[in-house]
């Protein structure tokens, strides 16, 4: 059953990613061009997903809308993972005062509700893509850092580390050649799950008007724009809502599948 869900999730991800990449070639209309003569049209052979309140083609906007969420979440995930990886390795490997200071900072960031913090930060600063990206990184890096620190502390106790020190292995070589490869499986699973959370955070902030700003196509912005027409044109809410749900579902299924295959500790606990 899980394998079937995984294959379905891969197909959904493939359709969304390929549709976003090749949006200029697949779009049938200009996603930014309004046409008041064709506003609020239902699904038809000309407009596959209908039109919005100012006559823009929903199918074309759906194709372009996936770009923003995917690129933003990937960028935020990579940057927060890089920052958390750097801080976690420094804390776990060198310890002492550096570990105390960084751990205290991580505790502060993890003690603040992430959604409230992002709303406050984006509300104080200008609501744009740069601010949204900054908010996503600030609320994500501490989680990566704590997990990396715990893994590094455990790896340092392994006998092979002492053996490498005995043959004159430097700290830099030990981190790059031996510690980082042992963190890869765990970080891959965490990164995949974090992408899904990032997309959900972007969707929530954009729906509140604090994320992606019009007229840039975005699924959450489309839902927000269509709230006044949920009775006369429910497809304006249903279609982008299904896109967000499908993307997050597919990413979470892939993350669970990777955890089952790569996380040895999780498999050992599950078998007990």
Image: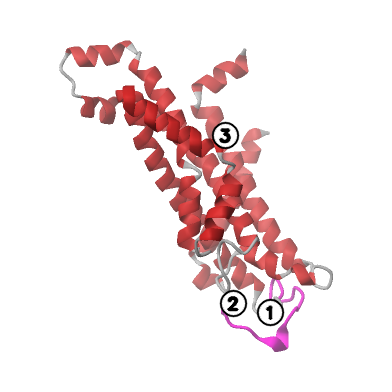
Which residue is identified by label 1? 46
* Magenta span main SS: loop
Which residue is at the front of the view, 251 or 74? Answer: 74
Quarter of the image for the C terminus: give it: top right
Q: Is residue 125 above or below residue 110?
A: below
Q: Secondary structure at mark 3?
A: helix
Q: Secondary structure at mark 1?
A: loop
Which residue is at the front of the view, 197 or 113? Answer: 113
Which residue is at the front of the view, 271 or 226? Answer: 226
Q: Which residues are magenta?
A: 28-51
Q: Earlier in the sequence, mark 3 or mark 1?
A: 1
Which residue is identified by label 2? 28
Q: Is residue 59 above or below residue 270?
A: below
Mark 3 and mark 1: span between their CA atoms? 39 Å
User: Crowding near pointer 2: few (<14 within 10 Å), some, many (20+)?
Assistant: some
Q: Which residue is outermost to the bottom?
A: 37
Q: Mark yes or no: residue 253 visible.
A: yes
Q: Position of residue 82 (x, y in %)?
A: 37, 42
Q: Earlier in the sequence, mark 2 or mark 1?
A: 2
Which residue is at the front of the view, 242 or 101? Answer: 101
User: Crowding near pointer 3: few (<14 within 10 Å), some, many (20+)?
Assistant: some
Magenta segment: does it hold 11?
A: no
Q: Position of residue 120 (x, y in %)?
A: 57, 54
Which residue is identified by label 3? 257
Q: Earlier in the sequence, mark 3 or mark 2?
A: 2
Q: Position of residue 226 (x, y in %)?
A: 73, 69
Residue 226 shown left or right of residue 87 in the figure: right
Q: Residue at x 64, y 70 (%)?
A: 59
Mark 3 and mark 2: span between their CA atoms? 36 Å
Q: Is residue 270 above or below residue 25?
A: above
């Amino acid at each position: 059953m899980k394998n079937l869900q995984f294959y379905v999730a891969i197909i959904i991800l493939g359709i969304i990613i390929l549709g976003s990449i090749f949006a200029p070639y697949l779009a049938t209309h200009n996603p930014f061009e309004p046409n008041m003569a064709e506003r609020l049209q239902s699904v038809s052979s000309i407009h596959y997903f209908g039109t919005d309140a100012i006559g823009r083609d929903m199918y074309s906007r759906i194709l372009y809308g996936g770009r923003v969420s995917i690129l933003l979440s990937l960028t935020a995930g990579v940057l927060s993972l890089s920052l958390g990886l750097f801080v976690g390795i420094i804390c776990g490997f060198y310890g002492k005062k550096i570990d105390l200071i960084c751990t205290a900072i991580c505790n502060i960031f993890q003690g603040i509700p992430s959604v409230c913090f992002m709303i406050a930060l984006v509300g104080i600063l200008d609501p744009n893509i740069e601010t949204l990206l900054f908010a996503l990184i600030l609320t994500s890096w501490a989680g990566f850092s704590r997990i990396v620190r715990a893994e590094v502390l455990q790896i340092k106790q392994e006998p092979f580390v002492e053996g490498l020190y005995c043959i004159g292995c430097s700290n830099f070589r030990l981190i790059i050649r031996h510690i980082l490869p042992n963190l890869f499986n765990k970080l891959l699973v965490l990164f995949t799950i974090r992408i899904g959370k990032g997309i959900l955070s972007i969707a929530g902030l954009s729906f509140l008007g604090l994320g992606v700003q019009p007229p840039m196509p975005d699924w959450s912005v489309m839902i927000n724009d269509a709230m006044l027409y949920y009775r006369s044109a429910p497809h304006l809410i249903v279609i982008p809502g299904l896109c967000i749900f499908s993307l997050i579902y597919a990413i979470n299924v892939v993350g669970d599948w990777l955890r089952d295959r790569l996380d040895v500790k999780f498999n050992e606990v599950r078998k007990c």
